[in-house]
Image (tube, rainbow, N blue to C red):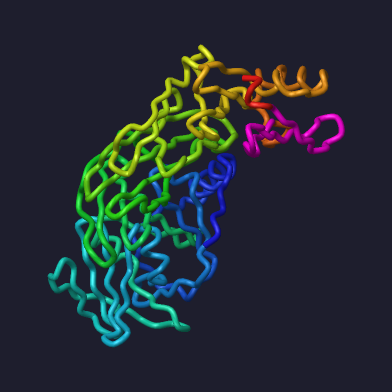
Amino acid sequence: MSILKKRIGNVVLLFTSMLMAGVFFSHVNVADAKSSKVYVQAGVETADQYSKLEDPIIIQQGRILLPIREISDYLSLNVSWNQKTKSATLYGVNKEIKLTHGSKTAYVDKKKVLLDVPLQMEKGKIYVPLQFVASSVKQKVTWDRTLKTILIPRTYAKGTADQMTYWIKLTTGELFQAKTNQIGTKIGQVSKRFKTMREFEVEKIAAGTYYLRMEESFGMAGTSRNTGQVLVKNGKVLDEDSFSFQGYYEDTTLHKSHGNVLLTNGKQARFLDKNGKVIALYNLTDIMRKDEIYMVEHYNQRMLILREYSSQHLIVYNVQSEKAAYVHELITLPEREREYLEQAGFDRNNEMVRDHIIFFDSIIDGVMTFHYKNKSNNMVNTYTLDLSQI
């Protein structure tokens, strides 16, 4: 499904048009024909999250039906299909919903429920009644008949890996877990409150150990950012951290190094092993003696490569000697390019294009390699730096 992110001006125009036309969201109960021009709002801050459905909706007996994969995606549910019985089961946080093809009998948490319209097959796809599924997970779905817009609130963000699913409740930070085709149950809580996050990354680190990485952009032009990390073992949160920042540039923080995972709040970074033991801890603000947000771009127990987010300047820190320096002050950049980087660093967040920044490439045989796109001629040049210089 393609996500069409609208700028705030378009959103204001949309809602202004709605008010002028006297249009307002009403409960789903219409008698339209099939439609393929439908946009869906989903999330806590719905204005930033419009999606256009790939498949046409079906409206039958005043009820909207959507492909089950679409519904499960918006409502953060897992889906299981039994070809033999022609039945579909959706699993969510403390919820199980079962529907059967052609039957008006459904089951919510093992309790029988009668449907207005049953599960249907259309061009090889499974369609289920949207309002029934949404109300089963306590979500109120509304429909604007004139604008062909469905409003679907989203309570949870979801992440899956190795047949294990995690949910984060956006408003409270509660964390839930379930194996494939099981009901999600609470295992802990994360400190950060996310607003528009739809899904997040999950990685299996070892048997029973999973690493969760969250990130979202929201607000005007998407310049407000939240990011976080969680380490879970055997259904228990071992540790977690998160931070917020402002800017156009993405979170460039790495996630793992030599099998250890990174937890950071932007000012402190710690690497943990699969059992949650802290292997290395760094106070990032002490390294440059500046109260800034820092991204960790590389770590090898000898060298730490940081990016100062506000200026986008790259930093090399020698763990053994505890010495740090900006890369642009160490490599042999042309004088005009060095001056440009220093000046641009003061208002870097006002630039939308991530360009003309020094990038770390690799460390081979004690020599670090960096890339930099020259502002004067747009040529990408390679620079090297011997570790012994730090």
Q: Of 321 and 242, which appears nearest the observer?
A: 321
Seen as rendered, the residue at the extreme right is 377
Quadrant of the image occupied by residue 315: top right
Residue 128 rendering spot, x and y as whole percentages: 34, 73
In the shown orientation, is residue 235 left or right of residue 312? left
Residue 94 rendering spot, x and y as whole percentages: 19, 57
Q: Looking at the rendering, in which quadrant would you find the C terminus?
A: top right
Residue extent of the magenta highlight: 358-385
Q: Of 382 and 240, which appears nearest the observer?
A: 382
Check residue 373 for magenta coloring: yes
Residue 135 rendering spot, x and y as whole percentages: 26, 60
Q: Of 259 and 216, which appears nearest the observer?
A: 259
- Against 39, is 7 above or below? above
The secondary structure that most of the magenta stretch takes on is strand
Seen as rendered, the residue at the extreme front is 365
Q: Of 233 and 365, which appears nearest the observer?
A: 365
- Against 242, is 211 above or below? below
Residue at the image position 54 percent from the left and 66 percent from the top: 37
- Against 313, is 214 above or below? below
Check residue 154 for magenta coloring: no
Residue at the image position 32 percent from the left and 36 percent from the top: 240
Please tell me how many numbered marks the rendered image carries.
Answer: 0
In the shown orientation, is residue 225 left or right of residue 239? right
Residue at the image position 56 percent from the left and 37 percent from the top: 250
Seen as rendered, the residue at the extreme bottom is 84
Seen as rendered, the residue at the extreme left is 111
Residue 140 rendering spot, x and y as whole percentages: 30, 55
